[in-house]
Every structure is written in structure tokens, then in C-alpha cells.
Image (cartoon, helix red, strand yellow):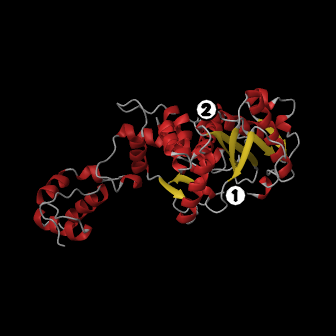
Amino acid sequence: MGRQSSSYVSLSLEQNNLLCEKHKAEPSLTHTQLARWATQQFQTQGDVKRSTVQCNLKRSADFVDVPDSQRQRKRRCSVAICASDQKVMQKLAEYKTWHDNATIKGSTVQKVALREGVELPSGGRLSRGWLYRFQQRTGLWFSLRHGEGGFLDQDLVDEGRKDLRAVDAGYRPQDVYNMDETALFYRREPRGSLTVDKKEKGKKQSKQRITVCVATNADGTDRLPLHFIGKSKVPIPLRNRDVLAEIGATYTNTAKAWMNTVKYCEWLLELNERMRQEGRHILLLVDNVSSHDDGPAQLPNVVIHKLPPNPTAALQPMDQGIIKSLKDEYQEKKEDAELDMFYSGVAYKPVDIFSAMKWLSEGWGDISTKTIRNCWCHTGIVSKMDMVYLLN
């Protein structure tokens, strides 16, 4: 398809500079000839107008000494905005050096900009639109180091969903629970980062890990205290601390910091005792893994049902966004604490296990009930009537 001659073509700052250089090199060329040259040279979607050439030649001074980060823009930033952007970029560079090549997220940029006194837009906040324009002006781009995907057999998912609906049919949403374990590499940085260097490589990630048991009921009214599993019986940061009283969580240990049958049984017995005291009988959905094979013989107040082994990810509410939301909350609190350290002028100190547990426990309380309910509904394992109740 040929060019649309009627469409208006706006040239970038770099293209306009080349146009002005062409005019200086060959002053005998008419504006019409320069317009044709620009159309062919820049392979524009439409024809460059003679009036565009005439107007831009009068503004030739605007296209000289344009920063690399702005060359593809159509308009040059004001001096005030450029100075503000440079201030934020400089502080981000200092932060990366301080934090040993820290991961820079969009929220990091926004928080640094606020701390640096960037003038707020008319809306009163640094929105995603502001962040996008900042990236366009400064050349920041998002680099994702790696990713992974998976495949689920939809027939198995549908069959598992049907079976689970039959199992939980006799329970109210507040009496149906799901528990899942997840690893928290509490010193690890997110996989992606905003950067101006497209060849920038990631750093070696920390392997410091704790396991977190996360459990809640279907209507989000009862979030069980997070249960942490580490390697040390009493890590140094936990000495002389009452973890349950201070952060509302529990801690235990195993040789590999994973859940095993012994710890699983201990957790179930505590849950059963709580339900006995409350006079409740609940259904607990758990992973189909070896550590969950042998539970206590007597659990009169807790009925355990294992999720089907293959489509677990699609049927487990925790995997539908609850655990992700929890880890996102953790990263936000970790980032805030590190920025506080940075702006206080103290040396960088890696996260200790108590701080990680504290931030995660705080994040657990910050997740909205609506998020929890939506994740349960997304699995499709609750009845349609219960879905209506949860969503409304």
C-alpha cells in the first residue's frame, strides 16, 4: 500500500536535525525538494509537507545538542524537566551503586522522584503515565532476564474442578480453607529492572531462603498466621524475641527449611485445636505432595482433601494470585526500607530473617479481602451460589 499523502508527518528531533544539516550542506534545494528527501530518507508513513520543512528550518536551533535520550522524541523537554530528570537519574545511579546493582522498578523511580521533590502533575500524583513519559525522556527500558511457562490439560482441570465442587458442597465459604507452602528468597531481587544500558547483566542472586505456609478461607475472613520454616532452630535475629506476639506469625525449623511430615502434622494439630475451641468443622484443601501424605490419625474438626496432582496450579486459590500479591507486598516494604537506609546515609545492610518475616506478615494483613475472594472464584472450585456471595 502506498503512502497516505494526506496524513500529517511529524519528524523526531534527530530527523529534524538531519534535515537542517541537509539544508546547510545543499542550500540550493527548495523546501519541496527537501520534503521529498525527508520522506525517502526517513521512510515516513506519509509524505513530509513543504510547510513542515519550512517551519522546522526556522527552528533549527531547537534541534542542536539534543541529549541521546531525547533524540527520538518529537518535542524537546523544558530545562526544568531536564534538570529534574537528571536529578532523579543521578540519584537512581547512586542507589544502584549503594545497593550493588539494585533492581530498579517503576515504583522505585516514582519513590525516588517524590523524595527528590519532583513537582507533581495536576493530578497530584506520579501516575503510570508520568512514569511512561519519564522513561521516554530518559531512555529507561525494562529488561526481563528470564521467564518460564507451563501447560495444563484443560480436561484434567475441568474434571478436578467438578470433583472439588462436590467435596466442598456441604461447607460454607468461611469453612473452606486452602493451605500452600512457598519459598521466599528474602534477599533476592526481582527478575526485571529498568535500565539505560541494554547490555547490563544481572548480579548473582542470594540463596537465603525460608518457607512460608499461607492459609486462608474462601471468603477471606480468616487469614491464618503465617507459618515460617527456616534451617536454624533459633536464628540470631530471632533470639530473645516472641515472634507470635511481635509479628503475629510462628516459626519452626527443618534441616532443609522445607515442610516435612512431622512439621505438617504439628501444624494440623494446632489448626484442629483452634477449630475445636471455636466449635467449628472445616474443610482444608492441600497440595498432593509427599510431605502431606501422612497426617494425624485424629482430626475431628478438620477434614483434609488433597488437590489433584496435575492441574494443582489452576485449582489452588493460593496459586491464583494470593501468594503473588503477598510477595509483591513484601517487595514494596523491602524497597521502602532500603530507600530509607539509602537516604539516611547509612551503609547498605542485607535483609535479615526477622525483617523478612515482619514485612511478609504485614503484607499478609494488607492484602484486600476482595483479592482473596476473587482468587478463590477464579479457580471455579466453589459453587455458583457461593461465587455470587463472594463477589458481592
Q: Is residue 342 visible?
A: no
Q: Are marks 2 and 1 in contact (CB under 8 Å)?
A: no
Going by the picture, which residue comes out furthest to the bottom?
1
**Distance Cα–Cα, label 2 vs label 1:** 40 Å
Asked where in the image residue 146 lies, by quadrant, the reply is: bottom right
Is the N terminus in the top left, top right, bottom left or bottom right quadrant?
A: bottom left
Residue bearing mark 2: 221
Crowding near the residue tagged with mark 2, few <14, some 14–19, many ≥20 C-alpha atoms within 10 Å: some
Q: Residue at x 78, y 37 (%)?
A: 272
Between disc 2 and disc 1, the foreground one is 2
Question: As rendered, which of 250 and 72 lies closer to the eye?
Answer: 250
Horizontal and vertical percent position of residue 110: 49, 39
Q: Report helix, strand or loop for mark 2.
A: loop
Q: Is residue 149 above or below residue 352?
A: below
Query: How many other residues sit within 10 Å of disc 1, few (<14), some (14-19) or many (≥20)?
Result: few
Residue drawn at the location 50% of the way across and 42% of the way down: 387
User: What residue sits right under mark 1 in the picture?
Assistant: 204
Examine the image and state in which quarter residue 279 appears.
top right
**In the drawing, does residue 138 fall left or right of residue 200?**
left
Residue 312 bears which disc, if any? Answer: none
Going by the numbered disc 2, the residue's amino acid type is: Thr
Q: Name the kind of residue labelled 1 in the image.
A: Lys
Q: Position of residue 174 (x, y in %)?
A: 61, 35
